[in-house]
Image (spheres, rainbow, N blue to C red):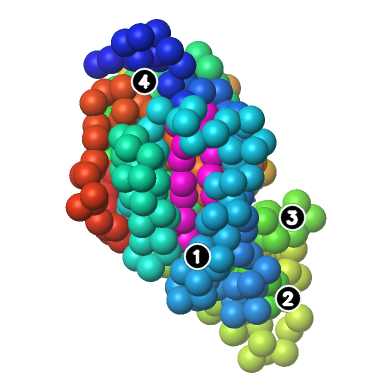
């Protein structure tokens, strides 16, 4: 596979990347795939907070309002003009179809009017690529755990763009479980960072929540059982008129999720013979997950890498990095490229 980081004329490759798959409108400019010149993110969290979750229609409207501003800001901050751009990279799935279509239509119009190559990027591949930006020496092969609001995947990265899914969630994504239990406890949206903060003050052994799939063969996950168990616990405490300790519930819930995520990942590394593991996605910012994974990796002599917080949650720099590797390996898309809401990591 081509891992050269310049084009044939030995000129820098400048990527303009666009991300709009959920509730962040983002644009980033990168030089040769791993150097981020600008990374602009307009988040809609405040807008969706009052609904307790992302409202797809509202997300699409907000993307339309923001995309022009975000792209201009990314160019300004990187001191680049459209003329300097080598190619356009854009998320085309998975995600909310209306949200994806805003970024994709914008990227297509740019590619068409500027006569620059268009490269469609898989959002999940984007998440794992965030590690290439932060860790300049990181190269495949390695094992990666991708944990976000929409996905929970354990993947063997065999080469740039070559993946084998070892396991995935059978039901809720890990971030979704954080958001749902936070909502049930009236803690606010998004739930992950709030639960993480409260968990630091609580006792992780206060309530024994189930660790689903832990002793099953294979690497799949399930989080709906843990979530239901928390909801049942909250209901039963309410019926008995016993006041809960939110910090303890958060710490116990987080410990259960972290146990499953970390043990499955270590098991995959050992069984497949890998010595490097990376984390990515919004839940990779979780302090409990980072701590436990660091501890277990150190015990097993496995190297652990994860991106800084700003590259864990949705951003366009990660899309640009993945798009760059697609570009140098010859991927080109036409104006017929469509949004694919349920795009799988190894399907395009
Ligand atoms: O990667 P991301 O921005 O969007 C998706 O592609 O889904 O991830 C957002 C998810 C939300 O579910 C949010 O609650 C979760 O990541 N999250 C966290 C933390 N920070 C964000 N979950 C646990 N602990 C955190 N510190
Ligand atoms: Zn994401």
Q: In the displayed image of the protein, which residue is found farthest to the top? A: 10
Query: Which residue is the site of mark 2?
Result: 244
Q: For the residue labelled by badge 2, is the local secondary structure a helix, a strand or a loop?
A: loop
Residue at 43 percent of width and 13 percent of height: 11
Q: Which percent across, then down, holds residue 293?
A: 56, 34
Measure how far apart labels 4 and 1 are at the Cα level.
Answer: 36 Å
Give the left or right position of residue 243, taking residue 224 as reference. right
Q: Which percent across, then down, holds residue 319?
A: 44, 39
Q: For the residue labelled by badge 1, is the local secondary structure a helix, a strand or a loop?
A: helix
How crowded pointer 4 is (Cα within 10 Å; few <14, some 14-19, many 20+) is rated as some
Query: What residue range appears in magenta?
Result: 15-30
| Rendered view: 207 above or below 121 | below
How crowded pointer 1 is (Cα within 10 Å; few <14, some 14-19, many 20+) is rated as some
Q: For the residue labelled by badge 4, is the local secondary structure a helix, a strand or a loop?
A: loop
Query: Which residue is the site of mark 3?
Result: 197
Ligand 1 falls in which quarter?
bottom right
Assess whether residue 260 is covered by the magenta stretch.
no
Query: Which residue is the site of mark 4?
Result: 140
Q: Earlier in the sequence, mark 3 or mark 4?
A: 4
Measure how far apart labels 2 and 1 are at the Cα level.
Answer: 43 Å
Give the left or right position of residue 14, taking residue 35 as reference. left
| Rendered view: 175 above or below 134 | below
Q: Earlier in the sequence, mark 4 or mark 2?
A: 4
């Amino acid at each position: 596979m081509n891992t050269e980081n310049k084009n044939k004329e030995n000129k820098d490759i400048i990527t303009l990347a666009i991300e709009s798959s959920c509730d962040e409108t983002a644009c980033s400019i990168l030089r040769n795939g791993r150097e981020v010149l600008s990374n602009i993110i307009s988040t809609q969290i405040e807008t969706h907070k009052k609904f307790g979750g992302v409202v797809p229609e509202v997300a699409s409207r907000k993307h339309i309002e923001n995309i022009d501003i975000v792209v201009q800001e990314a160019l300004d901050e990187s001191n680049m003009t459209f003329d300097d751009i080598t190619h356009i990279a854009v998320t085309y799935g998975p995600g909310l179809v209306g949200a994806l279509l805003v970024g994709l239509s914008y990227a297509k119009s740019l590619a068409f009017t500027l006569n620059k190559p268009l490269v469609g990027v898989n959002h999940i591949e984007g998440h794992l690529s965030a590690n290439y930006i932060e860790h300049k020496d990181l190269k495949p092969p390695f094992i990666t755990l991708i944990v976000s609001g929409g996905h929970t995947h354990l993947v063997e990265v065999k080469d740039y763009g070559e993946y084998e899914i070892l396991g995935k969630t059978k039901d809720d994504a890990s971030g979704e479980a954080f958001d749902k239990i936070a909502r049930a406890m009236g803690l606010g949206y998004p739930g992950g960072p709030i639960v993480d903060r409260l968990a630091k003050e609580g006792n992780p052994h206060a309530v024994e929540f189930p660790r689903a799939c832990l002793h099953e063969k294979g690497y799949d996950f399930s989080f709906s059982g843990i979530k239901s168990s928390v909801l049942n616990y909250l209901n039963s405490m309410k019926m008995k008129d016993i006041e809960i300790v939110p910090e303890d519930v958060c710490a116990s819930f987080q410990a259960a999720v972290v146990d499953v995520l970390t043990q499955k990942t270590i098991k995959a590394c050992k069984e497949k013979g890998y010595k490097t593991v990376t984390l990515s996605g919004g839940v990779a910012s979780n302090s409990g997950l980072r701590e436990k994974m660091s501890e277990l990796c150190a015990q097993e002599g496995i190297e652990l890498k994860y991106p800084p917080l700003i590259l864990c949650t949705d951003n366009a720099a990660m899309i640009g990095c993945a798009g760059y590797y697609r570009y140098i390996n010859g991927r080109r898309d036409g104006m017929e490229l469509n949004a694919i809401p349920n795009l799988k990591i190894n399907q395009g």
